[in-house]
Image (cartoon, rainbow, N blue to C red):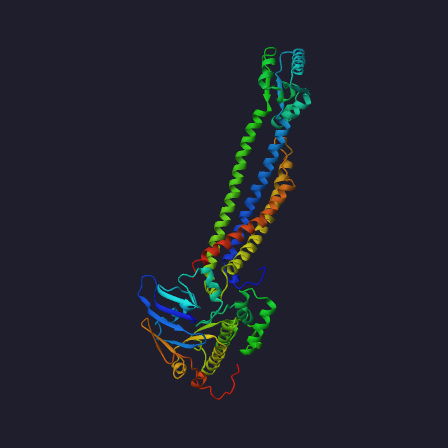
């Protein structure tokens, strides 16, 4: 099994309520780029949570990096979580830490030496255009800047799998295009990317498979093989030859 | 805090309440532990001083001459007994001094009938007891009184032992209360920090990494509270000693805390910090086990 993620007849219900996810089956190949869409309340966030191991399904089989998570001991999920990057919808930055410390978190939790942490974090913050805001706390940053800190935190440990929940929901089209470019670049380096979004302009004609959730059921449209057309053109940022943050 | 923390404890009010409670617990523990040491010292001192001693009292008779003869005869009988190491009469001034705590200046009045007192030191390995002395003395001097110090010493030791048990119970109660309070405040704090904990969990933080941060914070609060408790209790202990010494009475034994006692009192601070740290650590680990 060389799938990064494989779902087989997965169902999820909270408590004794109805199933919010029903018979979900799909797989994600290494290096693929998927969009996840659906109306509000369709279960996108729940599906993402199962994929980034923050939630266990009520039924069905879920394989992450080839491991059946229903039988995997809890202590062994740690190494899987460290190979996954997540950009949360509301960023979920730690407001008492600086941008630098927020981005450094995934490295520090793995016990990497502080000198290496500093080097990598500074490089990445420069790359995402936050060179002058390294010591700033999230509440003092704009929405776009917070978004970039959140993305930098998600990618600093070079994840094999990246999830982004509405990563462009709070930013204008120009910043959205830049963020998408960043995801494209990551995808080119082999990271499997899944982006949950409402933005039809982003998904239409992207050339990427679109996983559509509706009423707890999943339908996949678009080519199954990755064929990523630069999404930023669809977002109206095609005047820039290179993307700079 | 002692080191950079990924969890914002500054906004967490549980950190304000815990040191005060720990301070109170440390205060109680310091008093109890000091009490234990003092009582243990008193028991040991009294035991070594009086366990082989017997007091013989010869009540006053109608004439001074008879009193003198009775005293001489008693001394002779006592000194002739196997197992009696010493038999020394106490001077009238010595007896007056003993009566002073009860009678005050009246103890020195000439008219007061003062009994003759003989201090006897025995060797209990020689099979001698208060019964033996009574059997020898009573036929000759029928109204003589023989007191074994060990009898009231045993009574005192039992009383002290009861007080020691109470002091131990207080220390145990203080420990359990501290553990319970740390569990409660840690859980409350985890509830307040749920968002941060979830983020740390998702980005791959080991449970021990998260638990360490709570443990270090609990230890720090334990040190703060402990220091506060010690700062209040140490002057109070000195105060007790001063007040009892200034009473100037022989009714109270000398109360002083020796080096081992002071070391134990000071060790309460790191002990309470370690208890708080381990409690917070295990509480967090247990709670995190419910995360996927």
Residue B238 picture location, percent across and down: 63, 42
Q: Residue at x 30, y 65 (%)?
A: A18
Q: Nearer the viewer, residue A176 or A55?
A: A55
Q: Nearer the viewer, residue A120 or A23?
A: A23
Identify the image quadrant of residue A201.
Answer: bottom left
Residue A84, compared with residue B275, is above or below; it is below
Identify the image quadrant of residue B159.
Answer: top right
Tell me: A195 left or right of B226. Answer: left
Q: Quadrant of the N terminus of chain A?
A: bottom left
Residue A151 picture location, percent across and down: 49, 74
Q: Residue at x 37, y 72 (%)?
A: A26
Tell me: B210 left or right of A69. Answer: right
Q: Nearer the viewer, residue A86 or A67?
A: A67
Looking at this view, name the residue that lies furthest to the bottom: A239
Looking at this view, name the residue that lies furthest to the front: A1
Residue A126 picture location, percent across and down: 57, 77
Disc tally is: 0
Residue A236 picture location, percent across and down: 44, 86
């Amino acid at each position: 099994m060389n799938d990064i993620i494989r779902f087989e007849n997965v169902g999820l219900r909270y408590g004794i309520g109805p199933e919010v996810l029903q018979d979900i089956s799909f797989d994600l190949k290494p290096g693929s780029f998927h969009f996840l869409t659906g109306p509000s309340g369709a279960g996108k966030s729940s599906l993402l949570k199962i994929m980034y191991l923050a939630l266990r399904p009520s039924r069905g089989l879920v394989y992450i990096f080839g491991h059946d998570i229903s039988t995997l001991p809890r202590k062994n999920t740690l190494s899987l979580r460290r190979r996954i990057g997540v950009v949360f919808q509301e960023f979920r930055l730690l407001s008492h830490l600086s941008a630098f410390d927020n981005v450094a978190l995934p490295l520090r939790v793995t016990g990497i030496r502080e000198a290496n942490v500093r080097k990598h974090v500074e490089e990445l913050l420069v790359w995402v255009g936050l060179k002058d805001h390294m010591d700033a706390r999230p509440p003092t940053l704009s929405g776009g800047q917070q978004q970039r800190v959140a993305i930098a935190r998600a990618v600093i440990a070079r994840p094999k799998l990246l999830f982004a929940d509405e990563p462009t929901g709070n930013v204008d089209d120009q910043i959205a295009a830049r963020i998408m470019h960043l995801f494209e670049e990551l995808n080119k380096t082999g990271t499997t990317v899944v982006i949950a979004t409402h933005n039809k302009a982003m998904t239409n004609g992207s050339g990427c498979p679109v996983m559509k959730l509706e009423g707890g059921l999943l339908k996949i449209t678009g080519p199954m093989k990755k064929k990523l057309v630069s999404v930023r053109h669809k977002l109206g940022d095609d005047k820039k030859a290179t993307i700079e943050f | 805090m002692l080191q950079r923390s990924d969890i914002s404890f500054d906004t967490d009010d549980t950190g304000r309440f815990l040191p005060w409670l720990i301070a109170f617990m440390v205060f109680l523990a310091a008093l109890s532990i000091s009490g234990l040491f003092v009582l243990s010292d008193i028991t040991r001192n009294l035991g070594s001083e009086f366990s082989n001693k017997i007091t013989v009292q010869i009540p006053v008779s109608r004439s001074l001459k008879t009193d003198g003869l009775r005293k001489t005869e008693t001394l002779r009988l006592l000194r002739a007994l196997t197992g009696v190491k010493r038999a020394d009469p106490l001077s009238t001034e010595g007896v007056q001094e003993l009566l002073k705590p009860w009678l005050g200046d009246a103890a020195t009045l000439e008219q007061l009938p003062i009994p003759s007192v003989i201090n006897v030191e025995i060797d209990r390995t020689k099979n001698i007891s208060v019964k033996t002395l009574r059997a020898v003395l009573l036929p000759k001097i029928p109204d003589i009184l023989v007191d074994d110090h060990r009898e009231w010493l045993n009574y005192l030791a039992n009383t002290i032992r009861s007080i020691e048990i109470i002091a131990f119970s207080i220390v145990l109660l203080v420990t359990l209360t501290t553990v319970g309070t740390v569990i409660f405040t840690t859980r409350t704090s985890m509830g307040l920090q749920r968002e941060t904990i979830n983020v740390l969990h998702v980005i791959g933080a080991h449970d021990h990494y998260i638990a360490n941060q709570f443990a270090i914070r609990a230890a720090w609060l334990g040190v703060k509270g402990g220091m506060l408790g010690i700062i209040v209790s140490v002057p109070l202990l000195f105060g007790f000693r001063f007040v009892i010494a200034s009473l100037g009475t022989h009714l109270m034994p000398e109360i002083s805390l020796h080096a081992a006692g002071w070391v134990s009192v000071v060790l309460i601070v790191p002990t309470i910090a370690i208890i708080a740290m381990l409690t917070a650590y295990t509480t967090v680990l247990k709670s995190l086990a419910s995360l996927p």
